[in-house]
Image: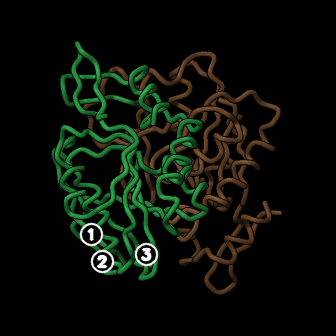
Chain colours: A brown, B green
Amino acid sequence: MQLLKDRIRKDGKIRGTEVLKVDSFLNHQMDVTLFDAIGAEFKRRFSDCEINKILTIEASGIGIACLAARHFSCPVVFAKKSQSSNISDEVFCAKVESFTHGKVYNVIVSKEYLHPGDKVLLIDDFLANGEALRGLASIVSQSGADLIGAGIVIEKAFQPGGDSLRASGMRVESLARVAAMSETDGITFVD
Amino acid sequence: MQLLKDRIRKDGKIRGTEVLKVDSFLNHQMDVTLFDAIGAEFKRRFSDCEINKILTIEASGIGIACLAARHFSCPVVFAKKSQSSNISDEVFCAKVESFTHGKVYNVIVSKEYLHPGDKVLLIDDFLANGEALRGLASIVSQSGADLIGAGIVIEKAFQPGGDSLRASGMRVESLARVAAMSETDGITFVD
């Protein structure tokens, strides 16, 4: 998605070879006009699918998922992060390890909001190691709903998550795939 | 806002006299068609103001704020909750006490995204004791930006936050103001 790649080049800040800060438009300050275009692009890519629910994870996936949901005319469910080990039997739960924050947390979704027959699209801002997507996919599987695929804004294609999830059979559509980054040479996208 | 009140009566679940669960459409599963109507109503109520930034707080304010921002043609900034006592000098920070969760946390916003001259609308899903709004207002004040007011989806008008904030001079527009609730008698709105 050229609009997105241009914006990443213009406003993204590279730290070392692994950290890409997009705080100014994606995950702290949020450019909803861009989010609307991102939502339209997800809809275009998944136009062959009858998606009736979008599942994302708090916090930075929520805005993108909500703008995308307008294009799919469906509700959004967001998985909540919980550090409590006391998990109610009224929720689906999966463990997710965050490499960024160096901890393991539970992601939970109420059993009321995912059911067999639902056709679910996962949406998130970043894909790196794929832990969050794996957790969300586990929750969809527990619910008996169908996982249609995942829409990702920025994939760090130099990290193993995307390839590993695709190899496992998940359809992953990433709008910008970063092949490599450096503070001196800038950013290279796949393709 | 009648559409919202009708939805609360239809799908809200009352627990005791203080807890109103609106998980099915507002803060876990999210009805973005309703959010779009809520956003339009906030725009109508603040149509006399030149708002150029919406400030909300993670996680459940984000979806509402993003749909509202389309109507204001402005970006959203979401304040992040942090339990760390180690606060960078690159952020504005305010302490917020959560009565629901029984703890105190810091809310932080990068100094890059709020400036003198900004005209800021606060948006959140619930107003009860007003702690979150007070924290966001403190952050706006620290930044030197102008606080235009607050748009709230559901105000628990039987709790002191709304009256106290209005008495302090804040313009608070709540789309549904709950006067009283009980499991037997249901919900009564102000007016």
Marks 3 and 1, the one that precedes in the sequence:
3
x and y percentages locating residue B4 in the rendered image: 45, 33
Q: Which residue lies furthest to the front in this view?
A: B191
Question: What is the secondary structure assignment of the residue under circle 2?
Answer: helix
Q: Mark 2 lies on which chain?
A: B
Say above or below: B86 vs A32.
below
Q: Distance between the residues labelled 2 and 3?
A: 9 Å
The residue under label 3 is: B114
Question: What is the secondary structure assignment of the residue under circle 1?
Answer: helix
The residue under the point 16% across, 46% down is B160
The answer as to whether the residues below labels 3 and 1 share one chain is yes
**Would you say residue B2 is visible in this rendering?**
yes
Question: Given the image, on which type of amino acid does mark 2 rest?
Answer: Gln
The answer as to whether the residues below labels 2 and 1 share one chain is yes
Q: Mark 1 lies on which chain?
A: B
Classify mark 3: residues with Cα within 10 Å, few (<14), some (14-19) or many (20+).
Answer: many
x and y percentages locating residue B159 in the rendered image: 18, 41
Say above or below: B64 vs B11.
below
Q: Which mark is residue A99?
A: none
**Nearer-the-camera pick, B66 or B121:** B121
Quarter of the figure that contains the C terminus of chain A: bottom right
Q: Residue B138 carries which label?
A: 1
The residue under the point 58% across, 54% down is A125
The residue under label 2 is: B142
Q: How far apart are marks 2 and 1 (CA)?
A: 6 Å
Question: Given the image, on which type of amino acid does mark 1 rest?
Answer: Ser
